[in-house]
Image (tube, grey):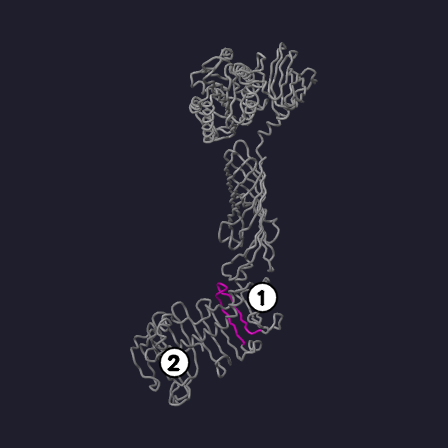
Amino acid sequence: MRHAILISSALLATACGEPVSNAVFEEDLEFLAALPDAEQQRVALDEEVEQADEARAAAGWCDPETRPYLLCWSYDVGGNINAHVLAMLAFVDYVRAWPPTERGPDSRVWGPYEYEPGRWIRLDMQRSGGLYTWSFSLSPAESGPWTPFFDGDHYRGETVARGVGSYTLDYAGYAAVTGEEAAGTLTVDYDTEADTELLVHFEEVLIGDLDQPLTADYWYGGDEDGGELEFSGEANWVEESDAEELFRVRTRWVDGEGGRSDATLGGGDIPDGWDDVRISQCWGRYGFGTWEWSNYDEVLTESGDPDACVFSDFAEPEHI
Amino acid sequence: MIALLLGLLSAGHAAVTRFALVLGNNEGAPDTRPLYFAEYDAEKMYRILTDVGGVDPERATLLLGASRNRLLREMGELRMAIQMAEANGDDTMLIFYYSGHADEERLELGRSWLTWEELDQFLRYSGADVRMAFLDACRSGAMTRAKGATRAPSFIFELSERLDAEGQVIVTSSARDEASQESDEIGGGYFTHFLASALSGAADADADGKVTLTEAYRYVYDETVYQTRESAHGTQHPTFEWDLAGEGDIVLADLDRGRATLVFTPDFQGRYAIFDRDRREFVAELDLDGTREHRVSLRPGTYLVQERFPTHLLVAQVRLADGETADLDGASFAAVEYEHDIAKGAIQRRIRRAKQPDLSIHVGAGTRRFSDPEVEASYFPTVVAGSIGARWNFHDHKWVSGDLVSGAGAGAIQVEGLSWDIPVVVTGTTLGVGFGYATAPRLFQVGGGIRMAGVYTTRAFPGQDIPTQALLSVAPGLEAWVGLHPGNLAFEFDLRSHYLPYLVDDRDVGFGFSEGLLTFGYRF
């Protein structure tokens, strides 16, 4: 057998053609791995709370009688982030189903593909060391002209799929080709090298049901045990008038055990001198409230057992 | 097969129906070397018995390479035929001839056998009035020794007074402790050669146109002993067992039945050999004393008549037409040196041919696939292949082969993680040689062995800007085949399994691939 291998090796030198290898396809896979993955780029909420939510959907989610509204709000925010990111990454998933149309030593091109009738899409990717840059373009015709609308970059970590990067969807660019009403940009900065961190930034986004441009930041960090979600905005927390208060929320949870949301309020109906209005709500497994507290009685009064909180300290947002 | 022979012309029998069962088998037990001429000798005896032995071809059966089961079946049919003839009031005679391997216990029929005892029982209870067995096999004397007979010198058999015989005669080619020898000089076994020669007329000592058992045995005994006297295997002594009651002489061959006759007038003196140019065989050898006419019964054809001298031959060519009787007066004899002897050359060519391996050429179709599902799925889909090849089957059950298998197939491969299939066109060519062992070349034959193949395989990716990839390597392997061989045709299923060492994607992997082929061939 050893002789056979040696003879074989000698003969290989005389073989006509490239050696048999799937390396080119493995490289295709590497390029695809450098694109954001919807499974990684999502806010992973406590599944037990979500399952409890589904079981009680008929009774109404976030019934103030049974659920802390900061929890409900956090889940709404998380769901919205996931929906937007998923919508963005639908373009990525689309090209994943096709082989590249052009291959270079450090580049790949997918498309043009007719994404929808009259809308052609293509993806150009470049590799330089561990940096992958990519750009989706749209065109009303197969031959162009091409309008970039979705691009990003990715630094590979220990594996290509795990790394640091960012991507931006230009709603205006997309709308320029599709004719839809849309504006603003949505940018996601991510770090998936170890755990998952997402910083989602809406900049003057005006799409769908939004009646005014949205500018907001959301941050999510999660690992296999739980996660955190930070967001801010304006809402009419103190209903003395229609004036909305500014708020910043940080929600933390441990999967299968419960969580805590802490919020700070300002402006609106908050009297002058109260620049440190705080609200905290805790919940246990399945999302049922265990304790809530505020230092401003106009918002809520303390109830429940503070020792039942999974997190005992008040924590303000750190990333937004 | 049934056939029989014996020209038993017994002076008091108006109707004698002769049956003959002629059996030849080159194959013996697994530990024996196959014979070259046993089946050939059986064919020769079959012709003699049906030409001059008085056996109607419809009552003569020739079995070549038959197994025990086949032989027993034929014996059963023969017994029924004899009994029907007896029921019609005919006197019957059964001649059994066997050429092949044997030991002290049995006839060897390839991997099966028939014991001497079983043969004796068959003969005794066949129902024939006279049973005769001619056994050209090593230690066939065991058959007569078992019956209490001993080596019989020719002169003790004075049978001319026997008439209206009934009983059994067994003539064996050698004594119990002797080998029966084949000769490259004559292209057959000594015993059968001289028995055939005797029945053709060489043994007609009284020149009455009939060869009796006594004459035949005496001739066969004398010639066999004489020709093997200096053999390295020892002198071969035919034996004879006689258990006949009645009177009269048993005539084995009636030369008047022959289709053509060659007559040596009393002028001829010396040792003559007659060579059939058409069949490339010696048909008779005669010692003529120049005192009387001598007749030899032959088939129509072209013959060389040789008179042998120590330094040269005198050779004449004679053509005999159907029904013609010709004498050699006026024949033109020419002196020929032994090295220019046409007969010898022809015999040697036939011997070489007999010793040459059987060649079969075959073409086929099938598939080639890699046994590792991952390799098949990710690298080489199964391809449809065609083949052309040759195999040489040697007489010692060995075979060697060479073949070319080439095929192509379009399919798709998958790479884990990719959500699309990759279209690929695979071609594969295998140039291989094999060596192994097979069962005896019968209707069904099975073989197995080892192989070494050069493998050239390409992968092309239509519609994609990826260069064609190629693999060239050598692959050791195993091969097994099973064949159905009616006549010269061969239908076989051939399965080969190879190990293909190769370095793929920086992984030192070994591919196992197999080829399954249905082939059709012709055996020369």
- Left or right relative to B209: residue A208: left
Residue to which mark 1 is pinned: A109
* Percent coordinates x, y for residue A254 in the rendering: 36, 71
User: Which residue is under mark 2?
Assistant: A263
Q: Main secondary structure of the magenta part?
A: strand
User: Which image quadrant is residue B292 in?
Assistant: top right
Is A169 covered by the magenta stretch?
yes
Name the residue nearer the viewer: A265 or B111: B111
Quadrant of residue A249 in the image?
bottom left
Question: Alpha-carbon neighbours of circle 1 within 10 Å: few (<14), some, or many (≥20)?
Answer: some
* B264 over A136 or under it: above or below: above
The three-letter amino acid code for the residue at tag 1 is Val
Residue type at the position of mark 2: Ala
Distance between the alpha carbons at the discs numbered 1 and 2 = 46 Å
Q: Which residues are magenta?
A: A148-170
Question: The disc numbered 2 marks a residue on which chain?
Answer: A
Task: Determine the chain carrying the residue at label 1.
Answer: A
Labels 1 and 2 touching (C-beta < 8 A): no
- Residue at image location 51% in from the left, 53% down from the top: B376
